[in-house]
C-alpha cells in the first residue's frame, strides 16, 4: 500500500491524499458507505458505482456469524461473494461484541460472549479476528481492540488501553506469520487508537501503535455516547502523534458538519450508518440541513429533494417521495438511501477539490453557514 499526501491546507491539518489498495485507488478525504452484511442496505453494487463510492465497509462480527467466513472465502472472499470489485474495509468485530453481544466477558485471551442471533457461546480472539478478515479478503483489516464505554474512569480506560495494545501485538504477530492477501496484493492493517476521554492515554495509545508500524491508524472509542466536544478532543489528542505519511480513519462518524471538522483536524477516512439508516426513516440530507420527507409540509411540494441531488433522484418531487413513504413503497427507501450517500460523497469530493485549490476554509464555512442556519 502506498499513501501519498497530494495537498495540504495551510490554515488547518486538512490534507488531500491518495491511497493505493489491492482492489483500486481511494482518493481522500473519503466517506465509506457501510455494508454491514456485505450489502449497503437497499442499494445494488452498480448504484454504488454510479454514486462514485470508492470503498465500502463490511462487518467482521456479522459476516462471521452469518454466512460464515469460510463460505465467503470459498466464493473468492467478499469481492467474489458480493461482486463489489473496488476496495473493502472490514472492522475487527470488537465494537459489535461491545454493543450487541450478551453476557460478554473480556479476558486476556479474547472476548467470550453469547451471540445476538441464537445465543450460542462464542470466543473471539485477536488471532481469530485476523483469520476471519483474511478469509474475507478485505483490502484493509482492522486490529482487534476493546472499545471502552462512555463514561469510564481513568483506571478502566488505562487497563483497557493496555489490553488493546497487547492484543495489537498479537495481531501483528499473526499478520507477520501468515501474510494475508487481498486479490493479488497484501492485505493492509490499521491499528486503533483508544484511551477514552483521557489525553495522555490517547497519546500513549498512538505512540505504542506507531511503534508497531501498521499500514494506517484509526481513532476508535468515539461516538459511544460522549458529547461532541469530547469526540473532537479525542481526534485532537491522537492525530498529532500519528505519522504524516499514513492514512487516518475516524471510526463510525458522523454528521456532515462533524466530517468537515474532522477533515480540518487531519482525518482522511470516515464511515457511518447515519445516511442510510436515517433514509429508511424518511430523513433526507439537504444543503439547508436534514428534512423529514414524511412531514405534511411536503405533501404538495413540486421541488426536488435538494438542488444538488443526483439526476437519479432529482427528477422526483418531494411530494412523490412523501407519497412513496406513506404508501410503504420500497422505492422510497432506495431513493433516499441513494440520495443521502450521494450527499456525503459529494461533500467529501468538495473537500478534496477545495484542499487542492487552497480554498478549504471557504468551502467549509460556506457549507456550515447554510447547513446550520436553521439550527
Image: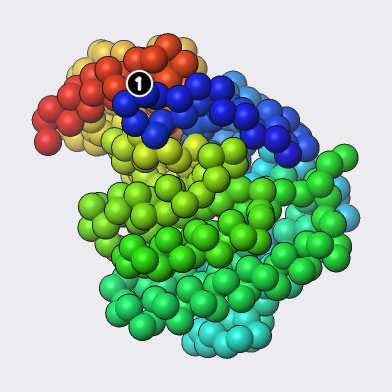
Can residue 246 be spotted in the picture? Answer: yes
Residue, far left? 374
Which quarter of the figure has residue 133?
bottom right
Which quarter of the figure has residue 142?
bottom right
Q: Which residue is pictured at 53% across the width and 87% down the height?
A: 105
Query: On screen, 55 above or below 116?
Result: above
Q: Is residue 133 left or right of residue 258?
A: right
Q: Which residue is pictured at 37% across the width and 50% down the height?
A: 235
Q: Is residue 199 left or right of residue 37?
A: left
Query: On screen, 138 above or below 108?
Result: above
User: Mark 1, residues whose alpha carbon is within 10 Å: few (<14), some, or many (≥20)?
Assistant: many
Helix, strand or loop under label 1: helix
Q: Which residue is pictured at 31% across the width and 37% down the height?
A: 261
Q: How many marks?
A: 1
Q: Which residue is pictured at 42% across the width and 78% down the height?
A: 158
Quarter of the picture holding the C terminus:
top left
Q: Report which residue position mark 1 lands on.
A: 360
Amino acid at each position: 500500500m502506498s499513501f501519498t499526501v497530494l495537498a495540504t491546507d495551510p490554515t488547518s491539518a486538512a490534507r488531500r491524499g491518495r491511497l493505493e489498495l489491492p482492489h483500486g485507488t481511494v482518493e481522500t478525504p473519503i466517506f465509506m458507505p457501510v455494508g454491514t452484511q456485505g450489502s449497503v442496505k437497499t442499494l445494488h453494487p452498480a448504484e454504488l458505482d454510479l454514486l462514485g463510492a470508492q470503498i465500502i465497509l463490511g462487518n467482521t462480527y456479522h459476516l462471521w456469524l452469518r454466512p460464515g467466513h469460510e463460505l465467503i472465502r470459498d466464493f473468492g472472499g467478499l469481492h467474489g461473494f458480493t461482486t463489489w470489485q473496488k476496495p473493502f474495509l472490514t472492522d475487527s468485530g470488537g465494537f459489535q461484541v461491545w454493543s450487541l453481544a450478551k453476557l460478554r466477558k473480556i479476558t486476556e485471551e479474547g472476548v467470550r460472549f453469547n451471540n445476538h442471533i441464537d445465543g450460542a457461546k462464542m470466543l473471539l480472539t485477536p488471532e481469530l479476528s485476523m483469520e476471519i478478515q483474511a478469509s474475507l479478503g478485505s483490502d484493509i483489516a482492522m486490529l482487534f481492540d476493546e472499545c471502552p464505554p462512555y463514561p469510564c474512569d481513568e483506571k478502566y480506560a488505562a487497563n483497557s488501553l493496555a489490553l488493546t495494545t497487547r492484543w495489537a501485538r498479537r495481531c501483528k504477530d499473526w499478520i507477520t506469520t501468515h501474510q494475508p492477501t487481498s486479490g493479488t496484493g497484501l492485505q493492509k492493517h490499521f491499528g486503533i487508537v483508544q484511551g477514552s476521554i483521557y489525553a495522555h492515554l490517547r497519546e500513549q495509545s498512538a505512540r505504542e501503535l506507531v511503534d508497531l508500524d501498521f499500514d494506517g491508524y484509526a481513532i476508535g472509542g468515539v461516538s459511544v455516547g460522549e458529547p461532541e466536544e469530547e469526540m473532537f478532543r479525542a481526534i485532537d489528542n491522537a492525530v498529532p502523534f500519528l505519522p504524516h505519511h499514513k492514512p487516518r480513519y475516524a471510526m463510525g462518524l458522523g454528521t456532515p458538519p462533524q466530517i468537515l471538522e474532522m477533515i480540518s483536524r487531519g482525518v482522511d477516512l470516515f464511515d457511518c450508518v447515519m445516511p442510510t439508516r436515517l433514509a429508511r426513516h424518511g430523513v433526507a440530507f439537504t444543503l439547508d440541513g436534514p428534512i423529514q420527507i414524511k412531514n405534511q409540509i411536503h405533501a404538495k411540494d413540486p421541488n426536488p429533494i435538494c438542488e444538488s441531488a443526483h439526476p437519479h433522484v432529482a427528477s422526483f418531487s418531494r411530494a412523490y417521495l412523501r407519497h412513496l413513504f406513506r404508501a410503504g413503497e420500497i422505492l422510497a427507501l432506495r431513493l433516499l438511501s441513494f440520495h443521502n450517500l450521494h450527499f456525503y460523497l459529494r461533500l467529501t469530493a468538495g473537500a478534496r477539490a477545495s484542499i487542492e485549490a487552497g480554498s478549504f476554509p471557504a468551502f467549509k464555512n460556506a457549507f456550515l453557514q447554510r447547513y446550520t442556519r436553521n439550527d
